Amino acid sequence: MRVQEPTLFIHGYSGTYFSFRKMLKRFAKNHWGEKSCIVIISRTGQIYFWGRPRSLIQVLFLENRDNVAHQVNWIWKLLNQLKTNYGISHVNLVAHSMGCVSVLLYLNQYGYDDRNSKVKRVVTIGAPFNDVEVGKRTPYIEDHPLTTTGPVEMSPLYRWLKANNIGMPADVRFLNIAGNLQNGTFSDGQVSVNSALSLRYLVRDVRRQYQEYIIHGKRAEHSLLHENEQVDQIIGKFLTH
């Protein structure tokens, strides 16, 4: 079964063309869609389309180490152009690492903006939702236990998101994937499972809107999560049903 809506793939910190390249090929092999377009967003926010955005769309930030605030603005501009120039009413977003935080911030601030394509489903992979540093690798893994109401300690950004969550659309569905190397760190080597799963406290209706999975073993390493065929199958099922 094919994914019905155009689906954008957004890389993480220092991501490149190669970040989602193999996953997109595997999606095509599984007949979930085909890579129809590459979107390049320049350092100044100019957007260039290589191909026509129809099925699977790879998004590349040339300034791939910039902050999430800039990425939020670029995502807004991209979804605005997809609706205005191509008549695309709904999209799905698949993001990795820092890209997940940018997507969540976008939804929080602009999820109800009628000028843009509406986001129907979101897949987050290895997301540092409760990290102080959401981009480059840090010397330690930020890991704060989860309670019934949220993490015992919250990063400034996470605290802001929890306090200002009224902008999150109620109809967006989330699939959240974390990695556990099973080496005692309870992490994917960069992002703790607890940081990734802290998303559940930011979703309005967890029972209806939210699914989460933990991938175990060596293939659960942060940069290998989007190279893992188990992850492919979980995402494919979520996007096609």
Image (cartoon, rainbow, N blue to C red):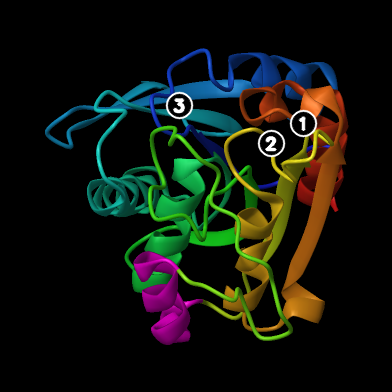
Q: Residue at x 70, y 51 (%)?
A: 193
Locate residue 100, reporting x and y percent. 51, 49
Residue at image mark 2:
188
Q: Mark 3 or mark 1: which comes first in sequence?
A: 3
Tell me if mark 1 has few (under 14), some (14-19) or many (20+) residues whose alpha carbon lies within 10 angstroms of its own: many
Circles 2 and 1, Cβ within 8 Å, touching? The answer is yes
Locate residue 54, reporting x and y percent. 55, 34
Residue at image mark 1:
220
Q: Amino acid at mark 3?
A: Arg
Q: Is residue 220 above or below residue 207?
A: above
Visible residue check, residue 178: yes
Residue at image mark 3:
52
Horizontal side of residue 40 vs 20, given as left or right: left
Quarter of the image with the N terminus is top right
Horizontal side of residue 47 vs 122, given as left or right: left
In the image, which is nearer the foreground, mark 3 or mark 2? 2
Q: Amino acid at mark 1?
A: Ala
Task: Give the secondary structure at mark 3.
Answer: loop
Circles 3 and 2, Cβ within 8 Å, touching? The answer is no
